Image (cartoon, helix red, strand yellow):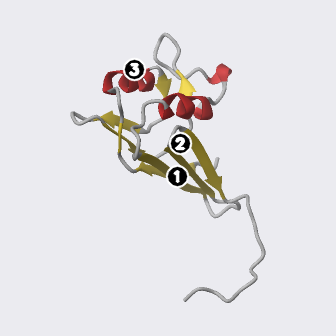
Amino acid sequence: MATLQAATTSTGAIVSDAQAVRQLCENHCFGTLNWEVDEEGELIIWGYDSFEVYESREDGLPDYEGGIVTYEFLRQLAEYIDVDEELDIQTAGYTKCRFPVLANRYVVRDGEVLHADLIGLEPITSHQPR
């Protein structure tokens, strides 16, 4: 059986209500990823897993039947990211040497959530940058 090997890291972002963000994070499961809101109200997310968010069941385990709620979680989180702050979450991973590799980026800023991955493809029309 092939196992996904992934790593996730984020920039830190100051949140407007540290306790509300802690509660939001506690109500969700991040696989084996870690999260922390420190004394200054800075949220960071990191660990050796892909960034996928599930709601927590009453027993604290992920609600797999409810499906992945990453976008919903990030939209809720966006309400607490301070103006002029940006939370940038990046995941990279692979399964053996199989195609395709995993690469995702989520950016939360100015009340919106942006996502990028390796699906997009555009033609090269100029010289390669040096």
Q: Residues within 10 Å of mark 2 (few under 14, many from 20)?
A: many
Counting every numbered tag in the picture gives 3
Tell me, for residue 91, which label it has, or none: 1
Relative to 89, residue 53 above or below:
above
- The three-letter amino acid code for the residue at tag 1 is Thr
- The three-letter amino acid code for the residue at tag 3 is Gln
Res. 40 in view? yes
Instruction: Tell which residue pokes out farthest to the right in this image.
Output: 123
Q: Nearer the viewer, residue 14 or 67?
A: 14
Instruction: Tell which residue pokes out farthest to the top in this image.
Output: 58
Q: Residue at x 49, y 44 (%)?
A: 109
Q: Residue at x 66, y 20 (%)?
A: 66
Quadrant position of residue 69? top right
Q: Which residue is mark 2?
A: 51
Q: Secondary structure at mark 3?
A: helix
Percent of width and height locating residue 45: 40, 42
Tell me, for residue 23, which label it has, or none: 3
Question: Mark 2 or 3 closer to N-term?
Answer: 3
The answer to whether mark 2 and mark 1 are in CB contact below 8 A is yes
Q: Residue at x 52, y 27 (%)?
A: 76
Left or right side of 81 for 90? right
